[in-house]
Image (spheres, rainbow, N blue to C red):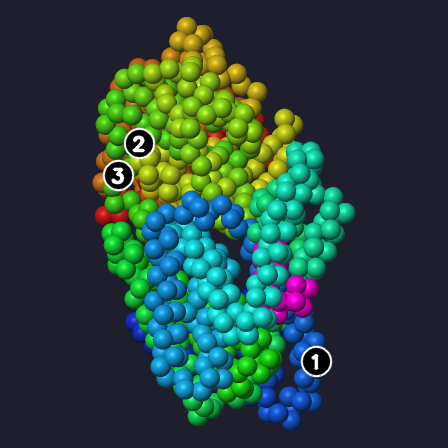
Amino acid sequence: MSFLTKPESYYEELVCEIIPQKVQSSGLWKGLAGGSGIEGWLNFAFPRVELVIALAGLILSPAVIGETASAKLITTHAVNGVGVFGALGYAGLLFFSGVKMDPTMVITVSRRAIDIGLLAVIPAAVLSITSLQVFCYNKEEKAKALGISIGYFSSTYPVITCMLNELKIINSELGRIAQTSAIVSDLFCVILFMIISLFRENVDNALKQLAIIIIYTSFVFLVIRPAIKLLIKRIPKGKPLDNFYLGLFIFMFLASIVMAKWAPRFRFLGPYVLGLAIPDGPPVGSTLVERLETMINHIFLPMLFATAGMRVEKLFFIIRNHISIITISNAAMAITVKLGACLLPPLYYNMPLKDAFTIAIIMCSKGVVELAGFIYSNDKRIIDAELYAVLFYFVLFMSSIVPMLVKNLYDPSKKYAGYNKRNLMALKLHSPLPIVTCIHLPDDVGSTINLLDVAWSSRDSPMIVNVLHLMKLRGQSTPIFISHDKTKNLHDSSHYENIIASFDKFEGNNWGAASVNAFTAISSPDFMHEDVCTLALDKTASLIILPFHRRWYIDGSVESDDKYIRTLNSRVLEMSPCSVGILMDRSSNINHSAYNDPLSKHEYNIAVIFIGGPDDREALTFAKRMALNTGVSLSVIHLVAAENEEGDDWGKMLDAVMLRDVMNIGYIYYKEKKVTDGPETATMLHALVHEFNLMIVGRRADLESPQTSGLREWSEFPELGALGDLLASADYYSRCSVLIVQQQQTIT
């Protein structure tokens, strides 16, 4: 078994052998690890893959194994040869950063993002350039120091976006602020880099390179971009990009790198500008990213990090050079000033100190962009081996410490903590019921509207439905959240016009009793839970309805099984600021309009399987609301243990009060059944499932009871709870849909 394929448990056991248990349990250990136990230490020790690759390159460098051994293993020509592929990977990174970025975002960024982005660069740049003018007496040294100074006072969009993705906070409020600020900062840094680079050249050469950049940029945006838009119009909707055009874009990317021959100071600006000219999203941007980005990020780019480490000639050194001392002092001052300057705008806009400090740290992050600049300076002999080693360790330190600090300081899930009661049981009589319902595919629309129709809304007890259409982010780096204006023409929104039209019809059928607000979230599946929970928090929702990740054909066989939806549901269950219901639809042929007619004799049969606990009480509360619909027949089946079970007396009392209320309602059928264990419960449900159109059960994830004993051992979907997992089984196939309910997890 290789190092990269060993399971995490192997490393946990290894660390346990090396580090005493007393040290592991100490506060200092947990604080450094950023968590509790071995898992946090592992995250601290190996925060980012590129750092591991850079350290691997460092091990092969003369600084570690010596010049003789290094010369035998890896020659200078080999390093330069591998470095060519690394440079190709870096050019690809900038190209895809441009492809995934929407240039129009620069126009729409908030004032807060502009302030943070500019203050992240200007004060540190002024300080660095001023100190170089004062303390650098040698003109040649001053030019060298000025050329590399942008590497430690810049804030680059690709580096910050990659880090936010790795930390899984790009969809959070703080992540969105940091990303838009990075766009402003990166744009300003590019302009500043052009000025500094041209300043170092003679006038004729500087004007020549500037003219080349202007001509190239104009050609890309005035000729190539319109041609690509014309191509997109000719591609049928939903059809992928042809391989011929894919090859053409690859050729254009490689040709953009050749611009470095005429403008060497801006050798990688060509791919970045070309990427910006390519429209983000499908069909062109998404196809390029899906087909090529993995190869760039996992094959070519790691070579850059490896060769960066191989170039280090001194592991431990004494700083003697005047320029090295100035550079280190400049870098330290720039980071300090940058940190302080980035704190001011968030505090001015009344952001909490902890979040403001986190944004300031994010804007100080360093990575591949800065490292590539230092590699170029080393190869061109602008800096010597000692200074390169200093700058390499500087980037290594910053790119490891920043993610660790951000991870410890910022937890986006804390804002969803249930300090306020937002569940169905907490709603007052006749108060509006705010719901967030999620839609992935058009097939989800019918089942969701069926449930909302049955859930019953009236003018006295209205329902506020917030429909969130979730779409996967393709070929873009910035997540998008759209609030649809009902006054707009639906044909302007072809992707979701059918979804909005269906819910508008639902609103019209329940005029005065239901209102609908439509939203679309376009983001990575790994971060969609942030959009769901944030919308529920903003709309003070009492219930989130999520579609189940599995779909069935009419004969009971599995049609689709989306692991991303399953992961999303699990994360929402864990972080939700309100109650959650997972809807497992197996009745797509039901005509829901029949249940709106109070004169209809057709009954929609609903059963609540009640054992006890907060989730079951929440499920019963929702079912009691449905029972107000005259087209609905509700049965409450109370499963009682054959032997008296021990448990929370207060919880048992709440269960008894709720069941006593149900027994006093004439239009609800109450049945009590004794069961001895889980298998008997499974047999009973198997017999009942064909009698109902909908079964509602509590999730009861952390509750043990005799009625469900033994069911968890064969669980396929543990996130649904024992009964929910049982009803999701293929053995329970019927036309009966299932709703699994979890009450809001409050913090007292």
**SS at badge 2:** loop
**Extreme front residue here?**
204
**SS at badge 1:** helix
Q: Position of residue 158 (x, y in %)?
A: 51, 60
The amino acid pointed to by label 1 is: Ala
Instruction: Give the quarter of the image for residue 295.
Output: bottom right
The amino acid pointed to by label 3 is: Lys
In the rendered image of this protein, does residue 25 appear above or below residue 104?
A: below
Residue contact at pointers 2 and 1, CB within 8 angstroms: no
| Residue 574 vs residue 733, the one in the foreground | 574
Q: Nearer the viewer, mark 3 or mark 1?
A: 1
For the residues labelled 3 and 2, the Cα–Cα distance comes to 9 Å
**Extreme right residue here?**
244
Is residue 419 shown left or right of residue 639? left
In the rendered image of this protein, does residue 746 appear above or below residue 559?
A: below
Residue pictured at 46% horizontal, 84% vertical? 139
Residue pictured at 36% horizontal, 21% vertical? 514
Chain-order first, disc 3 or disc 1: 1
Q: What residue does disc 1 label?
A: 78
Q: What residue does disc 3 label?
A: 421
Q: Position of residue 190 (x, y in %)?
A: 49, 62
**SS at badge 3:** loop
| Residue 735 vs residue 149, the one in the foreground | 149
Is residue 288 shown left or right of residue 392? right
**Range of the magenta residues?**
258-274
Any part of residue 298 in sight: no
In reply to whether residue 266 is colored magenta, the answer given is yes
For the residues labelled 2 and 1, the Cα–Cα distance comes to 67 Å
Q: What residue does disc 2 label?
A: 424
